[in-house]
Image (spheres, grey):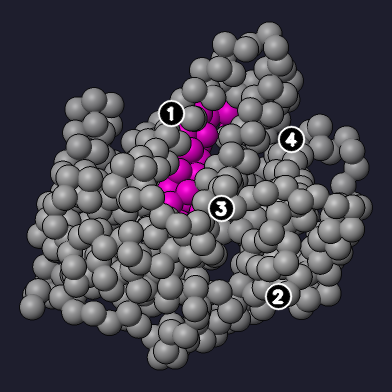
């Protein structure tokens, strides 16, 4: 059995690797320690998963010593890049880890939402660590594969497992923690991984929104919006891959908002890394990376126009190059290593998508989407507040605040993709038979809705936070 001190050391390796990657990408940006700590968790899990994927390429067996050695190699490379290549010196960072220095002093609201959040976290902890895992998708797509990887110490049996074409980041994380503990306990390992994602999301959202200029009370409201949504609460404690997918999507757009506001390319590159890691959570993640690319292109074009096409090409080339680093390896692994698989519901292939468009199906899917957003009870009152907020924003404000238009554009592309995809393929019948697939897909981008709300209402309270030198104002560009 591993000793307590060694256990802490091994568990800290993914977080340390994520922190180093975060520091390299934002080496010229003072983010404070809070944001770095919480975002490092998602980055570290992504690095861990790709470390295990590359071990599979070279047929290196999975055991704690080999994975630890791989992580130490990654950490060493990142450290050398940070200190020797970029000449970054570690120094004390100003700012407090948890307490904001905002002048917003609505103590009563903060205490209320703080108490609600703590009670919700306790409920989630009980569900994660005490209530047995029963979800079919969790067992079939994550835990069963993780158990096979744990006992077989390799991916040799992947082609014989259900859903073998699905991305493996969540399965890899559970396998790794099981190897660290030297025993199989899906309740403890999956619960710990998932609870880490939840804490990382809540803390990261707090510091991202504060940096965007959202008031402290509205930042607390954002967290309140999320934890009061029934569907999010279920998926916080259900081990499904949908919340981690929403986690990475939200952090991608948080980085893009800061890129638009601050004119720093570092946020764009961090968004690319997070987008690539999100593509290793679920199959849909690859399509979402496409939405991220389209969003970045449109914002660059709006910023620079045809006069700076070389700048647009350079930025898009870097963004796509970073994406390729994270996306291509698993695609290559599936083509080179996995044998040809029968096209079934368990082995998804894009040849399964055969357009069968009809006006009736399109109209029905629009209704299912509308009913899920407004009448399902899944999202509390967030959707209603969103539509009311839309009515409050004059068109002139979109010109002054292009990040708002960016969020709406991305939501529009996503919803169009959902309606067109479900209404013109065989998946239409899955949604009609059970509305749960629609809710789970919507969850992946739903966090953009409360983000839009607090960016509008929260920054109305804090006009001093508006950055008049943003990239789309006064002839500026995103080239920085």
Instruction: Report the Cα–Cα distance between label 1 and label 3.
Output: 20 Å
Lower sequence index among marks 1 and 4: 1
Q: Is residue 50 left or right of residue 231?
A: left
| Front label number (3 vs 4) | 3
Query: Can residue 197 be seen from the camera position used here?
Result: no
Q: Quadrant of residue 395?
A: top right
Residue on which the image places disc 4: 402
Magenta stretch, residue numbers? 262-283
Instruction: Report the Cα–Cα distance between label 1 and label 4.
Output: 25 Å
Q: Which mark is residue 321?
A: 1
Above/below status of 223 relative to 91: below
| Front label number (1 vs 4) | 1
Residue 436 is situated, as x and y percent measured from the top left of the image, at 67, 73
Lower sequence index among marks 2 and 1: 1
Do the numbered discs 3 and 4 sit on residues whose CB atoms are within 8 Å? no
Instruction: Report the Cα–Cα distance between label 2 and label 4.
Output: 37 Å
């Amino acid at each position: 059995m591993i000793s307590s001190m060694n256990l802490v050391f091994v568990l800290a390796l993914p977080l340390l690797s994520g922190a180093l990657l975060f520091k390299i990408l934002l080496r010229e940006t003072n983010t404070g320690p809070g944001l770095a700590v919480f975002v490092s968790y998602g980055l570290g899990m992504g690095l861990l998963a790709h470390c295990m994927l590359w071990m599979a390429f070279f047929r290196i067996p999975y055991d704690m010593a080999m994975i630890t050695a791989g992580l130490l190699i990654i950490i060493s490379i990142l450290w050398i890049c940070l200190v020797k290549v970029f000449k970054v010196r570690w120094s004390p960072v100003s700012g407090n880890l948890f307490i904001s220095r905002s002048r917003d002093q609505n103590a009563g609201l903060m205490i209320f939402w703080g108490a609600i959040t703590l009670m919700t976290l306790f409920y989630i902890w009980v569900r994660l660590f005490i209530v047995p895992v029963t979800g079919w998708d969790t067992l079939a797509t994550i835990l069963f594969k993780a158990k096979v990887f744990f006992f077989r110490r390799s991916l040799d049996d992947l082609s014989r497992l259900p859903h073998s074409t699905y991305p493996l980041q969540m399965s890899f994380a559970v396998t790794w923690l099981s190897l660290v503990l030297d025993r199989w306990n899906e309740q403890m390992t999956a619960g710990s991984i998932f609870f880490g994602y939840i804490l990382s999301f809540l803390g990261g959202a707090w510091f991202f929104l504060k940096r965007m200029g959202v008031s402290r009370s509205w930042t607390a409201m954002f967290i309140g919006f999320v934890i009061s949504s029934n569907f999010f609460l279920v998926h916080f404690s259900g081990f499904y891959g949908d919340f981690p997918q929403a986690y990475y999507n939200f952090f991608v757009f948080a980085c893009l908002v800061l890129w638009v506001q601050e004119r720093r390319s570092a946020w764009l590159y961090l968004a690319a890394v997070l987008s690539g890691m999100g593509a290793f959570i679920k199959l849909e993640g690859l399509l979402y990376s496409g939405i991220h690319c389209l969003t970045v292109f449109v914002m660059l074009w709006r910023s620079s126009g045809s006069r700076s096409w070389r700048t647009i090409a350079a930025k898009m080339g870097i963004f796509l190059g970073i994406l390729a680093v994270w996306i291509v390896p698993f695609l290559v692994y599936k083509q080179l290593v996995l044998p040809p698989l029968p096209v079934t519901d368990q082995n998804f292939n894009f040849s399964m998508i055969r357009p069968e468009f009809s006006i009736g199906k399109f109209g029905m899917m629009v209704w299912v989407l509308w009913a899920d957003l407004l009448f399902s009870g899944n999202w509390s009152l967030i959707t209603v507040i969103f539509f009311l907020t839309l009515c409050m924003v004059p068109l002139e404000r979109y010109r002054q605040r292009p990040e708002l238009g960016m969020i709406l554009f991305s939501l529009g592309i996503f919803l169009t993709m959902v309606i067109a995809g479900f209404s013109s393929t065989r998946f239409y019948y899955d949604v009609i038979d059970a509305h749960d697939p629609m809710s789970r897909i919507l969850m992946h981008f739903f966090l953009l809705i409360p983000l839009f709300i607090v960016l509008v209402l929260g920054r109305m309270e804090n006009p001093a936070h508006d950055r008049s030198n943003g990239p789309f104002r006064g002839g500026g560009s995103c080239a920085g």
